[in-house]
Image (cartoon, rainbow, N blue to C red):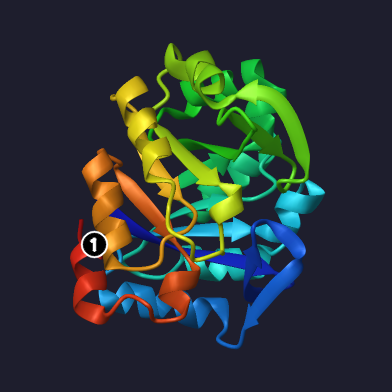
């Protein structure tokens, strides 16, 4: 399993939200580009960037910060947040992004996004399905910066794209994101069992090396971590082991 550091950008700053709440924001003093370079020096192969302003407003916003980090030597970068038009996919790929992460559009316009998968290929598009568990324990998707609830279930959403070559899915348990409460290991175990050919990226709740091992044991292809890495909760040798996959 590969550890992919995450940098969330809002207003040009490196931030973390608590459970997707824009009013519960932690702003980190280090510039996003400095953080990205540090991860590269520590051995990161991939970086996950999120334009939080874009996720909320539906259009790429933090162009300068994104462009600078995409250009960090040695890093392959996947970018998400507000990718709701084909033109945004084209723009990010032309800037050098290795992969574009599409969330709300995949839920709201699945036919159009399926065409993107076929056109750009399954290695250039990752679908982001952000979930909240309902009272029955079923995973239902949230959209538009996690503000809007949908009636679409996680597995139903993945099934829509399976025949179009879907390879990469980033699944975030919103109620664990930024909370350092531990990942939803059982959720990702079910995801891998149901769709074993998908390269699942597990996101939300990672606290430490033990959490990364637990996710690796589910068969997840990658784990996304933001807050735990920013706050130094995983030491350098442990971090390097997972960064190198």
Is residue 98 visible to the viewer in this orientation of the structure?
Answer: no
Q: Secondary structure at mark 1?
A: helix
Q: Which quarter of the picture shows residue 24?
A: bottom right
| Residue 225 to residue 171: above or below | below
Q: Foreground residue, 203 or 183?
A: 183
Q: Choose between 172 and 181: the one closer to the eye.
A: 181
Relative to 53, say whether 164 is above or below. above
Q: Position of residue 241 (x, y in %)?
A: 18, 66
Q: Position of residue 12 (x, y in %)?
A: 69, 74
Q: Using residue 40 as the reference point, say whether residue 148 is left or right of it.
A: right
Q: Residue at the location (64% across, 20% down)?
A: 110
Residue bearing mark 1: 242
Residue occupying the far front of the picture: 135
Give the quarter of the image for residue 105. top right
Residue 34 vs residue 111: left or right? left
Q: Position of residue 193 (x, y in %)?
A: 30, 25
Q: Is residue 151 visible?
A: yes
The x and y percentages for residue 68 are 54, 70
From the viewer's side, name the closer residue of 95 and 74.
74
Relative to 41, residue 18 above or below: above
For the point 59% across and 57% down, the residue is 50
Residue nearest the observer in this picture, 237 or 61: 237
Disc 1 residue crowd, few under 14, some 14–19, many 20+, Cα 10 Å:
many
Determine the image quadrant of residue 36. Answer: bottom left
Quadrant (top left, top right, bottom left, bottom right) of the C terminus: bottom left
Which residue is found at the position 65% from the left and 50% from the top?
Answer: 81
Q: Please tell me which residue is depicted at 53% across the width and 59% down the height of the picture.
A: 49
Please tell me whether residue 87 is drawn above or below residue 183 in the rendered image. Answer: above
């Amino acid at each position: 399993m590969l550890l992919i550091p995450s940098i969330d950008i809002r207003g040009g700053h490196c931030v973390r939200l608590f459970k997707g709440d824009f009013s519960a924001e932690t702003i980190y003093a280090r510039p996003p580009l400095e953080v990205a370079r540090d991860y590269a020096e520590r051995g990161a192969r991939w970086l996950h960037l999120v334009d939080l302003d874009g996720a909320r407003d539906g259009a790429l916003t933090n162009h300068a910060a994104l462009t600078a980090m995409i250009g960090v030597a040695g890093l392959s970068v996947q970018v998400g947040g507000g990718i709701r038009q084909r033109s945004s996919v084209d723009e990010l790929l032309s800037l050098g992004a290795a992969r574009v992460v599409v969330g709300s559009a995949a839920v709201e316009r699945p036919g159009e996004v399926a065409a993107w998968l076929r056109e750009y290929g399954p290695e250039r598009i990752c679908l982001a399905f952000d979930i909240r568990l309902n009272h029955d324990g079923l995973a239902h998707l949230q959209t538009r910066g996690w503000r809007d609830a949908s009636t679409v279930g996680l597995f139903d959403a993945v099934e829509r794209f399976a025949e179009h070559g879907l390879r990469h899915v980033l699944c975030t348990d919103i109620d664990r994101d930024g909370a350092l409460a531990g990942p939803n290991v059982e959720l990702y175990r079910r995801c891998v069992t149901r769709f074993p050919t998908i390269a699942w990226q597990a996101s939300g709740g990672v606290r430490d090396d033990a959490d990364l091992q637990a996710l690796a044991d589910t068969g997840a292809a990658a784990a996304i971590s933001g807050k735990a890495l920013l706050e130094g909760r995983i030491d350098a040798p442990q971090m390097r082991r997972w960064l190198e996959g």
